[in-house]
Amino acid sequence: MAAPVERFLALWGEIANLGHARALSAWDQETHMPRAGGAARARLSATLAGVRHARLVAPELGAAVERCAEEAEPGSVLAAQVREARRILRRVTRLPERLVREKAAAASHGHEAWSAARAGKDFALFRPALARLLALAREEADLLAEPGQSRYEVLLDEREPGAKEPAVAALLGELARELAPLVHAAGASGRRPDPAAARGDFPPERQLAFAREVAERFGFDFARGRLDPAPHPFCTGIARDDVRLTWRADAGDFRPALFGILHETGHGLYEQNLPEEWEHTPIGEAVSLGVHESQSRLWENLVARSRAFWSWALPRLHAHFPGARHVTLARLLPLLHTSEPSLNRVEADQGTYDLHVCVRFELERALISGALEVGDLPAAWDAAYARTLGLRPRDAAEGVLQDIHWSMGAFGYFPTYTLGNLIAAQLYAAARRELGDLDAAFARGEFQPLHAWLREKIHRHGSFHPAAELVERATGRPLASADYLAQRKADAAEYYGAG
Ligand code: ZN
């Protein structure tokens, strides 16, 4: 008979492959599937999900994991494998199949109700579906909670394993307090960056060529990855050697395609550099959504919005678009560091983005705890925007109905975006301390030193260390908001003369 560890990893490898088949099917659905294929694809996804679930709950797997737990030395690779496997198995074994089915049905119905409500600008059409999704999320949280864990923390833990609600609340509270005066100062400065600095005639296929050139420079390996058009940009790791990115373009503005592709490139670099020796095992995966998002935001926002990057990239842009001479460093850089309150999170600029997340975090915690009734959500949303960003939505579509997350029952997701910003800033500060003058390298179009540093400090560890420990090991300190706030303040000073 095979040793327990071999049995455990063999069973897990098959489960990982079933997950990859689902990911491939979902990618195809967004990129190539004919429109009429939806019903057949839904059946295929349901079958794959069912087979994967049956494999996960099989007693043989649980027994193999527990036998490995008895053998594993503390701090060993096997101990980490057991920790991650137990975390994943706890979810699937504690949630009854009825709840999983009800959640899937409520999410599908919720998405339809939300689309209709958004089109009709009428929250009432979404209200019953949201109430149902919240009830199921509470039920799920109660089943999964460890002693002392709040319901919200359980939901957060799904995306950001190990995250503690009070710690995340403290970080986001500090951000809300510190960012508000910066946004105010930017507004009071009277400076308004000119969007014409990025507009013009930008044929999408040339935008693709330009962005691919940059992504390749950042280190994305197109022999082990693809880039295809889709309605929404995303990254999906089918395998370490098969990482798929998507893009979409605005023919009149080069920013959405370029920054969208470079964001997904950051995710893709993480996926392509996960540990080869642990592929298809529990610790071969990315460690958390926040850490994943830190990789995309680091490349998109910290590298690709910097003056040093553009001193290399602008001549490349002009080479791809000879008619774009009006795009100059002096006009473009302030535009890339805009700080203007707006109502939409997805379109929000760097200066104000986290305030959108703070609003959602506050509201979804209150919804989950029951402190806020679903019927009172639109008024609470509008009040929070008025208080935080000084703006009031004209209708529910512009306000409380703008995001897809709650319609699919994804509560506890939003904070991971801001955690991504904080982790990115702390990693970037540490890389600059260790690697010296990165700006000089960027200005020559050299990004390999930064890529290698991230591979060494983050990518190659997979989920061997829990997320918080990984960040602390990489940067020498626990996650804090200091590096991110320092950067926000520096931007406000440089582009708005604030502070
Ligand atoms: Zn992302």
Image (cartoon, helix red, strand yellow):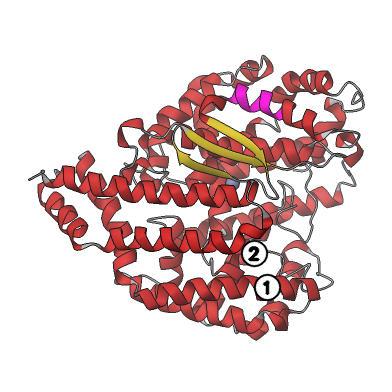
- For image coordinates 80% across by 23% down, the residue present is 317
What type is the residue that disc 2 sits on? Answer: Ile
Q: Which residues are magenta?
A: 211-218
Looking at the image, is 387 positioned above or below residue 459? below
Q: How many numbered marks appear?
A: 2
Residue 274 seen anywhere in this rendered image of the structure: yes
SS category of the residue bearing label 1: helix
**Cα separation between marks 1 and 2:** 8 Å
Side (left or right) of 255 relative to 262: right
Question: Residue 86: which quarter of the image?
Answer: bottom left
Side (left or right) of 432 relative to 280: right
- For image coordinates 86% across by 46% down, the residue present is 189
Please, what is the dominant secondary structure of the magenta stretch? helix
Numbered label attached to residue 114: 1
Q: Position of residue 206 (x, y in %)?
A: 79, 28
Q: Position of residue 452 (x, y in %)?
A: 47, 23
Q: Which residue in the protein does label 2 denote?
A: 404
Q: Position of residue 60 (x, y in %)?
A: 17, 58
- For image coordinates 23% across by 62% down, the residue present is 58
